Amino acid sequence: MNLIGNAQSQSSKISIVLILFLCFLSSSCTRNSEENPANEAPNTFLWAWENREDLRFFNPDVFGVAFLAQSLFLEKNDVVLIPRRQPLKVSPETYLIAVTRIETRKAGNKPTLSAKQKDKLVSLLLKTAKLKKIKAIQLDFDVVKSERSFYRDVINDLRDRLPRKFDLTITALASWCTDDRWFGDLPINEAIPMLFQMGNDKIRIRKMLSNKTDWKEPLCRKSYGLALNEPFERGLISNRRRFYFKSGSWQKSDLQKIKR
């Protein structure tokens, strides 16, 4: 699910150190990941995308933050890095997930999906796990069928090299969680089904959930991905984790919208 829209092209040589500087500019981000076990993740997460965010007014006992750490574009035999450019401020106790958006260039820049490209992609993903206070990393990649084998290799390699204390999650198109179950054997902790911007699947998925039919893929049965501008109430199982997306910066007034 494309949550960020079109990013401006930048040099692949931009250092990931910029992410550390911009994303953790606040002195509140100083604790190590060992201080809060992964199983203490809250049931509600805010997706903090490419906006200037000050989320210190959200109660860290109730809300976690899954923030865009970087965007990676696959083109030809290279991986172009677009680091986070906006500051993020959170309370010291906030449970943080580092999210990477992955996209493939089209037309004349179509990626080779080579072993070299996979290795560079995995290396950049591993760097997000070194950010302070990170408890998990999340991949957001709307792969088409021809890219799935490559994505599988990326996830398997990443899991092998990622410390076991980190959860590894992915976002998933809602269709992936029904009949198109292609990732059930991957070494991930969960897949978050996107219940917004569903296109042609919208009516079918809404009807399925309103009839209390659960996802066929077990990895999709832990959480929901929702958007504030697309209310989705019927058929959701109450004890599952919610990830909320909003276009623009989060405000205090959004608390009431989430509660409703």
Image: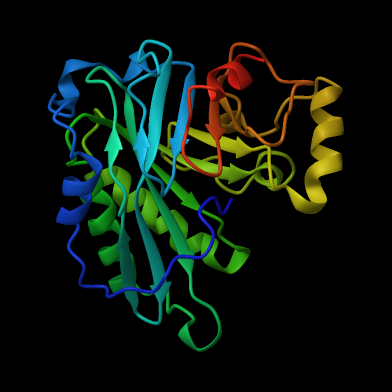
Is 114 left, or right, of 164 in this rendering? right
Colouring style: rainbow
Where 181 falls versus 92 (above or below)? below
Outermost bottom residue: 108
Quarter of the image that includes the C terminus: top right
Q: Residue at x 25, y 43 (%)?
A: 23
Measuring from the top left, give residue 48's x and y in whole percent: 42, 38
Where 125 falls versus 148 (above or below)? above
Q: Residue at x 54, y 79 (%)?
A: 106
Q: Foreground: 217 or 192?
A: 192
Q: Quadrant of residue 66?
A: top left
Is 147 left, or right, of 60 in this rendering? right
Q: Residue at x 41, y 77 (%)?
A: 75
Q: Foreground: 137 or 159?
A: 137
Is 193 left, or right, of 101 in this rendering? right
Is 204 left, or right, of 161 in this rendering? right
Q: Quadrant of residue 245?
A: top right
Where 137 falls versus 80 (above or below)? above
Q: Foreground: 23 or 176?
A: 23
Measuring from the top left, give residue 74's x and y in whole percent: 41, 71
Measuring from the top left, give residue 175's x and y in whole percent: 71, 46
Q: Residue at x 22, y 47 (%)?
A: 22
Where 62 falls versus 9 (above or below)? above
What is the count of numbered marks? 0
Measuring from the top left, give residue 120's x and y in whole percent: 26, 66
Q: Foreground: 91 or 209?
A: 91
Q: Quadrant of residue 254?
A: top right
